[in-house]
Image (cartoon, grey):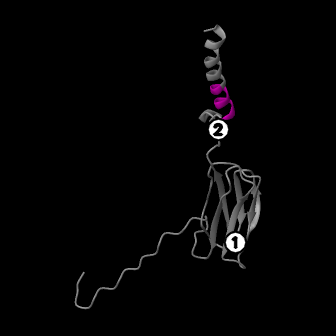
Amino acid sequence: MTTLSLLRPSLALAASIFFLTAGSPRPRPAHDAKKTKPCKTCVINGPTCVAPGNAGIFTLSGGTTAGWTVSCGTVIRSNSTMITVVFPSSGCTLSDIETAGATCGGADIQVHIMAGCAVSGETPAPVTKEKPASPGTTH
C-alpha cells in the first residue's frame, strides 16, 4: 500500500466535512442579534377637572416632547416637559392635551371644564348629604 492510498480516505473525509460545513448557514450568536431598547412610557400629570376661566399646569414625566396640542384652551407657556393652559369660560366642557413628537411615544390627558371644579384645578371633594332621620327615631 502506498502513502497516497492511505491519504485518499482522509482527504475524502476532510473534503466532505468542508463541504457540509461551508454550505450550511451558521446560526448567529444571541449577542449578534439586533438589540432593541424597551419602549419608554410617559405620563402627563395635572388636574383632570378645571373651573371655567381658570388655568391648569400639566407636566410630562418619563420623556420630553417637541410640542403640545390642546383641543380647547389657550396655551400660556410651554416647554418640553410642562404646559400651562387657560380654559375658556364657555364653549367647551372637555379638552384633550397631547404631546406631539415625544421621546417616549406620546401621552395625553382629558380635562373636564365645569363649574363644580375647584379654581386651583384640583378635583373637588365629593359632597355628602346627611340623610334625614326616619320618623320615629331619635338622635
Residue 46: image quadrant is bottom right
| Residue at numbered disc 1 | 53
Residue 70 is situated, as x and y percent measured from the top left of the image, at 73, 66
Element on which disc 2 rests:
loop
Return the mark for residue 33. Answer: 2
Majority secondary structure in the magenta region: helix
Q: Residue at x 62, y 26 (%)?
A: 17
Q: Residues within 10 Å of mark 2 (few under 14, many from 20)?
A: few
Q: Between disc 2 and disc 1, whose residue precedes?
A: 2
For marks 2 and 1, give the one nearer the viewer. Answer: 2
Residue 36 is situated, as x and y percent measured from the top left of the image, at 65, 43
Check the image and report above or below for 14 versus 58: above
Q: Residue at x 73, y 52 (%)?
A: 65
17 or 50, nearer to the observer? 17
Q: Label 1 is placed on what type of residue?
A: Gly
Q: Label 2 is placed on what type of residue?
A: Ala
Residue 35 is situated, as x and y percent measured from the top left of the image, at 65, 39
19 or 26, nearer to the observer? 19
Return the mark for residue 61. Answer: none
Q: Residues at badges 2 and 1 in contact (C-beta under 8 Å)?
A: no
Whether the magenta-drawn stretch holds residue 32 is answered as no
Label 2 – label 1 distance at C-alpha: 55 Å
Q: Residues within 10 Å of mark 1 (few under 14, many from 20)?
A: some
Check the image and report above or below for 60 versus 51: above
Per the rendered image, the range of residues in magenta is 16-25
Question: Going by the picture, which residue comes out furthest to the bottom?
Answer: 135
